[in-house]
Image (cartoon, rainbow, N blue to C red):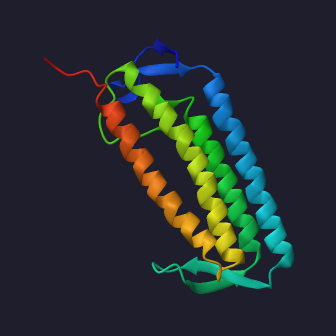
């Protein structure tokens, strides 16, 4: 991944210009396919669901609130927006991505950009599992997918954060 360093920005973070790459394109295409899948699932469930669907799930992943089936489409909109926002933030990591440590070296942005792209895919999968659970709250498969995606999101965040942290400049 190639970066062009620009002047420092807010909080003395080094700023960068992230160029489009084949790697980025692959993540964007996969995310687009998942967003299309999300919309297909949401529309099919909307057309075939009763007027009321589960809208909230407890810690045991059992439905504990119901609402209008239009929430299926609202979740697809939110999932689409969130996934696109994650992909856009990969191009502006110095402005749009907060890390639990100070970014002091331009090299730290490579794992941060990779993290946001991987998280975009995982966020799309998260919304697919949520919409599927809302349309079919009795099925076990969406619940397993939801748990797996939650674990993946946590692992991804920790892995790339540690990777970026290790690349920081240290004061000597």
Query: Furthest-left residue in view?
Result: 172
Using the image as rendered, state which of residue 128 and residue 82 is in the foreground: 128
Side of 136 where 105 appears, left or right? left
Compared to residue 24, the image places residue 65 above or below, namely: below
Residue 15, position in %: x, y?
Answer: 44, 21
Above or below: residue 26 compared with residue 158: above
Is residue 5 placed above or below 131 in the rendered structure?
Answer: above
The residue located at (62%, 71%) in the rendering is: 141
Q: Position of residue 150 (x, y in %)?
A: 48, 60
The percent position of residue 34, horizontal first and vertical second, equals 71, 50
Q: Which residue is drawn at 29% across and 25% down?
A: 168
Does the image show residue 52?
yes
Task: From the viewer's side, name the closer residue of 59 and 56.
Answer: 59
Q: Which residue is drawn at 79% across and 72% down?
A: 45
Residue 147 location, x and y as percent? Answer: 50, 66
Number of marks in picture? 0
Q: Quadrant of residue 134?
A: bottom right
């Amino acid at each position: 991944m190639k970066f062009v360093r620009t002047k420092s920005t807010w909080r003395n973070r080094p700023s960068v210009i992230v160029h489009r790459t084949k790697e980025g394109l692959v993540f964007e295409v996969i995310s687009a396919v998942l967003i299309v899948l999300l919309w297909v699932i949401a529309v099919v469930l909307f057309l075939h669901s009763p007027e009321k669907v589960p809208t909230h799930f407890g810690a045991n992943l059992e439905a504990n609130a119901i609402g209008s089936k239009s929430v299926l489409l609202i979740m697809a909109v939110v999932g689409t927006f969130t996934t696109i926002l994650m992909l856009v933030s990969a191009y502006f990591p110095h402005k749009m991505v907060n890390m639990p440590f100070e970014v002091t070296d331009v090299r730290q942005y490579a794992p941060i950009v990779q993290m946001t792209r991987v998280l975009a895919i995982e966020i799309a999968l998260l919304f697919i599992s949520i919409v599927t659970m809302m349309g079919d709250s009795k099925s076990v498969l969406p619940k397993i997918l939801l748990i797996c995606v939650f674990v993946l999101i946590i692992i991804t965040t920790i892995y790339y954060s540690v990777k970026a942290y290790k690349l920081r400049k240290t004061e000597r």
